[in-house]
Amino acid sequence: MNAASINELLLDTDLLSKLELVKVFKRHFEARAGQGELRSIVIDYLMDSDDDLRISNFDQVRFYGPSSGLSRYVANQLLLSLNVSSIKNKIWVIDQLNVSLKNLYDSKNPLLKTTKARLLIELLEQFLGDHFQRITNHRFLAIYFVPFENKQSNAAFDINTNSIAVFRTKRKKTQKPEYIFLHEFGHIIHCTLFKTTKEVPNSFIEFNKQMNPKFFEYSREDQLEIYADLFSIAVMLDSEFEDHNPFIKTMKRVHTEKIREYFLTELSKVR
Ligand SMILES: [Zn+2]
């Protein structure tokens, strides 16, 4: 396949062209063919499609709306596959990308608006203070708005490329995209700031002993979902987005305040 057709597949906004790209890259790696040309095609695409080429040290977050979200998400994963060193890891990145793409399907459910995401990021920056930069290891965070629904998740954080792919929201009647975004960020906080990917933090277990004895009837996975939900409460409380949180209105004020206090105390302990 020549450079022009690969570039065309990168620019296309449909899923089939992305699955085709994945095949091309996988065949290429399996054949152990040279990567120089693929690398320049992907980098040229990424540079040409960015309206703002200025890569500033001041940029903390970059937003890529639904018209380019899928293409840029895929292009960055392809670049990652070129950047990792062993063929085994290259193929692993490509296989993961293939799985993610196969989970996507057309949907009319809402997608978080870029304008709203900017406001939510401001809210997170206020809440997290200096810790915000640590989450992304002092590199900028890319947020891709991918206009498809995902069979498995509402959003996906990738620590290798420092990016979040936001999909159309599942269960649209009960869940607002703004709440879901902050819930997903709760998982990111858990992995990056408190570095306990699969474990429930001890302090959170202690907190629930007092607040919610029912907590211990849930599986560890569900306990981590509760963690993300409570994080969303802590951030959204008293903000313009408070109404978008499904729990705040059902809880006593004193409980929501305790939740916020829990996360603020945790943040104050992070060095
Ligand atoms: Zn979750």
Image: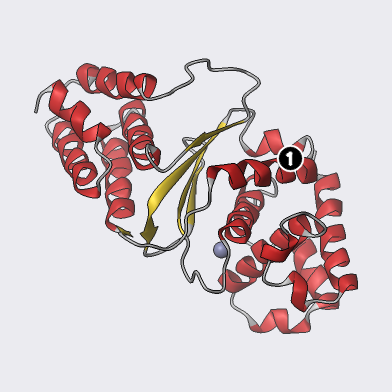
Residue that extends furthest to the left in the rendered view of this protein: 1
Q: Quadrant of ligand 1?
A: bottom right
> Where's residue 144, x and y in %?
46, 41
The N terminus lies in which quarter of the figure?
top left
Vertically, is 89 above or below 7? below
Q: Nearer the viewer, residue 220 or 42?
A: 42
Vertically, is 66 above or below 51? below
The residue under the point 45% across, 45% down is 145
> Where's residue 9, x and y in %?
20, 35
> Where's residue 258, x and y in %?
87, 66
The residue under the point 30% across, 31% down is 86
Residue 33 in view: no
Q: Amino acid at mark 1?
A: Glu
Q: Secondary structure at mark 1?
A: helix
The residue where tag 1 is placed is 125
Residue 254 in view: yes
> Where's residue 60, x and y in %?
63, 29
Q: Is the residue marked by circle 1 packed among few (<14), some (14-19), or many (20+) residues within 10 Å?
A: some
Q: Is residue 30 left or right of residue 240?
A: left
Question: Does mark 1 have its CB less than 8 Å from ligand 1?
Answer: no
Q: Nearer the viewer, residue 178 or 266?
A: 178
